[in-house]
């Protein structure tokens, strides 16, 4: 269905990201896609509602910054996550984010 709706998409903007903050952790301490797609994780969650599936995947927090034009409407969102573009071992996430192979 194609429909002309005046005003729709006029404020459509890209979502720039900054991926520069990084740190190292001991092997085995960083969650990855296989941590979540693991039968043991499903079993643990089904039995006790604990484990890696008991929290939103890689979601740490959100914060909004109010703009000058309309103090009732946030203009900037900060999304803090605990994953990187390599969380899935280079299978798909980097393509979804928009990174190229270069």
Image: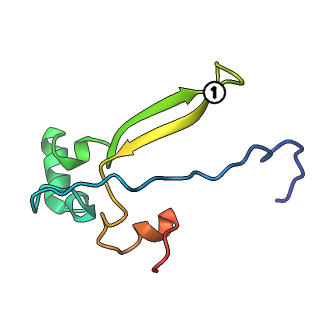
Label 1 neighbour load within 10 Å: few <14, some 14-19, many 20+: few
Q: Residue 15, how many percent across, how many down?
A: 58, 51
Residue 101, image x, y percentages: 45, 80
Q: Is residue 102 left or right of residue 66?
A: left
Q: Residue at x 18, y 56 (%)?
A: 30
Q: Residue at x 90, y 51 (%)?
A: 4
Determine the residue located farthest toward the bottom in the rendered image. Answer: 102
Is 35 left or right of 97, judged from the image as shown?
left
The residue sitting at 29% across, 55% down in the picture is 22
Q: Residue 70, percent across and down? A: 70, 22
Above or below 28: residue 59: above
Describe residue 44's horizontal placement relative to residue 68 as left or right: left
Q: How many marks overall?
A: 1
The quadrant in which residue 68 appears is top right
Q: Nearer the viewer, residue 74 or 43?
A: 74
Residue that protrudes farthest toward the top in the picture: 72
Question: How is colour applied across the structure in the image?
Answer: rainbow
* Vertical side of 102 occupied by 86: above or below: above
Compared to 85, does 13 lie above or below? above
Up the image or down, 72 lies above or below 28; here it is above
Residue bearing the label numbered 1: 67
Residue visible at 43% across and 68% down? Answer: 94
Quadrant position of the N terminus in the picture: bottom right
Residue 54 position in % (x across, y down)? 24, 42
Q: What SS does tag 1 mark?
A: loop
**Left or right of residue 17: residue 70:** right
């Amino acid at each position: 269905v194609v429909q002309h709706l005046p005003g729709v998409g006029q404020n459509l903007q890209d979502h720039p990201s900054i991926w520069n903050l990084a740190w190292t952790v001991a092997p085995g301490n960083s969650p990855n896609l296989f941590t979540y797609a693991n039968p043991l994780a499903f079993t643990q969650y089904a039995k006790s509602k604990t484990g890696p599936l008991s929290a939103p995947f890689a979601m740490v927090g959100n914060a909004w910054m109010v703009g000058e034009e309309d103090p009732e409407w946030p203009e900037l969102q900060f999304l803090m996550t605990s994953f990187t573009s390599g969380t899935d071992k280079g299978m798909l996430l980097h393509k979804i984010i928009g990174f190229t192979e270069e």
